[in-house]
Amino acid sequence: MSKDLTTSSIHRQNILNNPFALEKIQEHFDFKGTLFENEQVYTKAKVAELLGVDTRTIERYVKNHTDEFGSNGYRVLKGKSLKIFKLQYVSDTGVGEKAATLGVFNFRAILNLAMVLTESERAREIRSRVLDIVLDVIAKKTGGHTRFINQRAQDYLPASYQEFSYRKLFTDALRDYVDMGGTKYRHFTNLIYQAIFKEDAAEYRRILNITDKSRTRDTMYSEVLELIASFESGIADQLKERSAALERKLTQAETEELFKASESNPFIKPYIEGARTRMASRDLCFRDALHDKLEGYIQSVPAVDFEKFLGETSKNLSERLEQEEVLSVFKRLKDR
């Protein structure tokens, strides 16, 4: 997937949805606008001046990116809002008194425009600086360890502990009810991974560049871990029931049939789709890791995810383990 901001709407939106990066970017550029309705706004003429192009170029880009700019802060003033703007600022902004509408940008919308504007050297410089700031913000927030950014979420530890519990049920069921050698544990674990995110463990580790002895699941998001736990729990029960019905252990082929049936279950399909979208989108945004087989699931990361992994409620694992409420959650899970 192209990382060129002029062509990739997903990469553009990932920056525009990141409130922590936006704050630093706005501080850096400090564009002087007009205070209106509690935010700085900029007329097309002012934006043309800031980006070094003429207003006709601005109008053409607005026409070609109406929906995108509109969702990121560009708006057209008319009626009462325009009347108030004219009364307060018409002499300062050069807006014609007879104008029936007026398009204005906020900072976010200017940044959006600078990301797609190819005719401007100033816009190119802005794009380059923005990318540096975004990388710096994420690195500082995570202490440079984006591989484990998943662990900063408040719901990671409970999900990890729950999955660990169900993992034991799953491996015990493979031991007791499947007639295969020791390779069955890796084989059927990979079938779960392939069912959920279309990759086996080796592929996943290669994409995330995990070359040390770190546990694969230590890098997975809570939603993925919860879905893995659901698979493990469901498969464990089915193996036990099927083995009892046949009064023998299951063959590899019979066990694989159970996995296929679970993967195609319509009740679990929405959860698989959601896990794929979250993993593919977050890994591209936060870890610069592209899951080729999930490229069709990539979306821009919502603002709530930046808060989840970089905001005030996010913490690294060692900080999280010191919290009393986390320890109480573990106790409840242990005693269930």
Image (cartoon, rainbow, N blue to C red):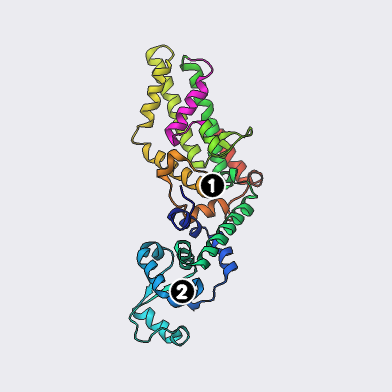
- Relative to 106, say whether 290 is above or below: above
Secondary structure mostly seen in the magenta stretch: helix
Of tags 2 and 1, the one toward the viewer is 2
Q: Is residue 166 visible?
A: yes
Badge 2 vs badge 1, beta-carbon distance below 8 Å: no
- Relative to 58, say whether 238 is above or below: above
Report which residue position mark 1 lands on.
288
Q: Amino acid at mark 1?
A: Asp
Quarter of the view holding residue 237: top left
The residue at the point 51 percent across, 33 percent down is 203
Instruction: Indicate the position of residue 49 as horizontal and vertical percent values.
Output: 49, 76
Which disc, if any, is residue 13? Answer: none
Instruction: Indicate the position of residue 247 as horizontal and vertical percent values.
Output: 40, 11
Task: Give the residues drawn in magenta, as a range.
Answer: 180-201
Q: Determine the residue located farthest toward the top in the rendered image.
A: 247
Q: Amino acid at mark 2?
A: Ala
Quarter of the view holding residue 328: top right
Instruction: Indicate the position of residue 226 as horizontal and vertical percent values.
Output: 48, 38
- Precedes in sequence: disc 2 or disc 1: 2
Query: Mark 2 falls on what kind of element?
Result: helix
Residue 166 or 129: which is nearer the viewer?
129
Instruction: Indicate the position of residue 120 as horizontal and vertical percent values.
Output: 48, 67
Q: Is residue 161 visible?
A: no
Report which residue position mark 2 lands on.
48
